[in-house]
């Protein structure tokens, strides 16, 4: 996906990018490749692939969820900033918090935010399990998202404790979503969520399957969740 296709396909979805925003994506791409030589941020470094599989893919959440209003977003395990930084560039009204367990990624994100002149972004070096127990963050976010971090039963335990009652958990997944959802249904319910809708589509050009699951937080998460670091992965709620 070249830059013109990126701009045009987003415009078809109602996301109109200014020249300044397009420059921000270009700077993001350059910094990603530059820093990737020093630390492992992504296996994808070809420009057209980054625009498709990182930038466009991250923004696909906005085809189904309204990001135009002012809201607080937490991105769990964002790695090199996906999906929240591409979303923040397109929707500057968002207040973004990223939590990641690897400090070197946080260093990259700090530098990236300064270079892109992003405001209302903060980066937290922490495990999602301990972050979700922190009263400053627990049930504080309008929307929590994660992209390909863990299977649904595990991901729900890492993300739903951070969502405000009435807020959304938006999980971005590849092809195995339906099977994952069946296994994750119990966890979603136990943690206070309810599946609102699942959107399935194909990423343009390469036509790979994508699924976006929108879960509404209906009731508070029981205090015992999330459990200790590593426990959700070892023994998921199933």
Image (tube, helix red, strand yellow):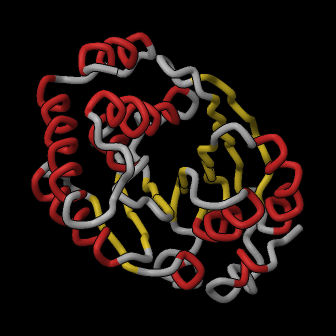
33 is higher (above) or lower (below) than 40: above
- Residue at the spot 61% in from the left edge and 53% down from the top edge: 167
Q: Quadrant of residue 195?
A: top right
> Which residue is located at x 25 percent, y 23 percent?
17
Determine whether, in the image, residue 234 is placed left or right of residue 209.
Answer: right
**86 above or below 8?**
below
- Would you identify the image quadrant in which residue 11 lies? top left
Q: Quadrant of the C terminus?
A: bottom right
Tell me residue 29's x, y (percent): 21, 41
Q: Is residue 174 left or right of residue 179?
A: left
Using the image as rendered, state which of residue 219 and residue 212 is in the foreground. Answer: 212
Foreground of the two, 28 or 40: 40
Judge by depth and name the residue closer to the eye, 133 or 38.
38
Seen in the picture, residue 229 relative to 60 is either above or below; the reply is below
Residue at 58% over, 68% down: 162
Residue 228: x, y in percent?
66, 89
Question: Number of callouts in the render?
Answer: 0
Q: Position of residue 109 (x, y in %)?
A: 25, 62
In the displayed structure, would residue 91 be above or below residue 230?
Answer: above
Nearer to the camera, 52 or 10:
52
Q: Quadrant of residue 41?
A: bottom left
Judged left or right of residue 28, residue 91 is right
């Amino acid at each position: 996906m070249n830059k013109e296709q990126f701009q045009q396909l987003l415009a078809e979805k109602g996301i109109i990018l200014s020249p300044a925003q397009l420059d921000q994506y270009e700077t993001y791409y350059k910094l990603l490749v530059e820093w990737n030589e020093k630390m492992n941020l992504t296996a994808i470094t070809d420009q057209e692939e980054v625009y498709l599989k990182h930038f466009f893919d991250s923004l696909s959440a906005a085809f189904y969820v309204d990001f135009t209003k002012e809201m607080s977003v937490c991105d769990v395990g964002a790695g090199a900033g996906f999906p929240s930084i591409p979303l923040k560039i397109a929707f500057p009204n968002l207040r973004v918090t990223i939590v990641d367990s690897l400090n070197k990624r946080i260093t990259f994100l700090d530098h990236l935010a300064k270079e892109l002149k992003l405001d209302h972004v903060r980066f937290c070096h922490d495990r999602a399990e301990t972050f979700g127990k922190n009263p400053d963050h627990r049930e504080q976010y309008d929307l929590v998202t994660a992209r390909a971090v863990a299977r649904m039963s595990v991901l729900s335990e890492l993300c739903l404790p951070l969502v405000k009652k009435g807020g959304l958990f938006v999980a971005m997944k590849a092809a195995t979503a339906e099977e994952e959802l069946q296994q994750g249904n119990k966890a979603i319910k136990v943690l206070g969520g309810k599946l609102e809708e699942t959107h399935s589509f194909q990423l343009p050009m390469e036509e790979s399957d994508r699924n976006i699951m929108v879960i509404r937080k209906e009731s508070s998460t029981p205090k015992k969740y999330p459990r200790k670091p590593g426990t959700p992965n070892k023994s998921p709620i199933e």
